[in-house]
Image (cartoon, rainbow, N blue to C red):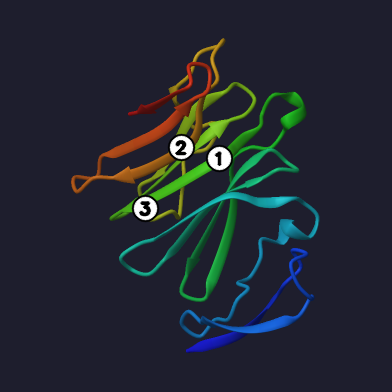
Amino acid sequence: GMQTVYDVDTDGTGPDVATPVKVPVFATEAFPTPLDPESLTDDLGLYTSIAVDASGVIHIAYYNRTKGALKYARKSGATWTYTQLDGGDPVNGNDKGFGTSIAVSGPKVGIAYFDLSYANLLFKESLDGGVNFPSGTGTVLDGSPSDDIGRSPSIAYDDSGNIGIAYWDSTHGSLKFI
């Protein structure tokens, strides 16, 4: 079905008039979807990336700027779960998730993300459809103590379930691929 929302012209080019716009409603749920409870106190939802697996499970990776943390949301059926996967202490050098990309392949859910504290490309992978991820900091795929490597990652799985990640090497101004 369709739902009516209102677009308001506030860019200064015309009067601030609410114009009705029809947008699709997914399944029986209207926008907005339930929010991570931390959104009531934290600045989160930046650098979002979404993937939907073959069973219709929704997987979202995003960044909590207040806590400097990589977050993961999963919707299976009518149930949303929210998990902090990495970071969480930006003052003490643990700011992870600044830039995320998520992909699924069968039971694998992979997330590529940037370590803002140490300027490295990181990766975490669940092997059970996103129910569990390894604890602790993700695997460093590229980085060095003096370089800024791994910004703006984009991840995909090939038909064999192998990952490919494209990302930016800010220090050398170049596109890289693993």
Q: Residue furthest left?
A: 160
Labelled pair 3, 2 in contact (Cβ < 8 Å)? no
Labelled pair 1, 2 in contact (Cβ < 8 Å)? yes
In this view, 71 is above or below 59: above
Q: Which residue is mark 3?
A: 128
Labelled pair 3, 1 in contact (Cβ < 8 Å)? no
For the residue pair 172 and 62, the one nearer the viewer reads as 172
Q: Residues within 10 Å of mark 1 (few under 14, many from 20)?
A: many
The amino acid sitting under disc 2 is: Pro
Q: Calculate the distance from the C-alpha at mark 1 to the C-alpha at mark 2.
A: 7 Å
Q: Quadrant of residue 82?
A: bottom right
Left or right of residue 53: residue 45: right
Residue 170, image x and y in percent?
52, 23
Mark 3 or mark 2: which comes first in sequence? 3
Task: Please name the residue shown 46% across and 29% down the image.
Answer: 168
Q: Which residue is mark 1?
A: 99
The amino acid sitting under disc 1 is: Gly
Task: Please name the residue shown 64% across and 82% down the image.
Answer: 5
The amino acid sitting under disc 3 is: Asp
Q: Which label lies toward us, 3 or 1?
A: 1
Q: Residues within 10 Å of mark 2 (few under 14, many from 20)?
A: many
Residue 24, image x and y in percent?
49, 81
- Per the rendering, the mark at residue 153 is 2
Task: Please name the residue shown 62% across and 29% down the image.
Answer: 116
Residue 152, image x and y in percent?
50, 37
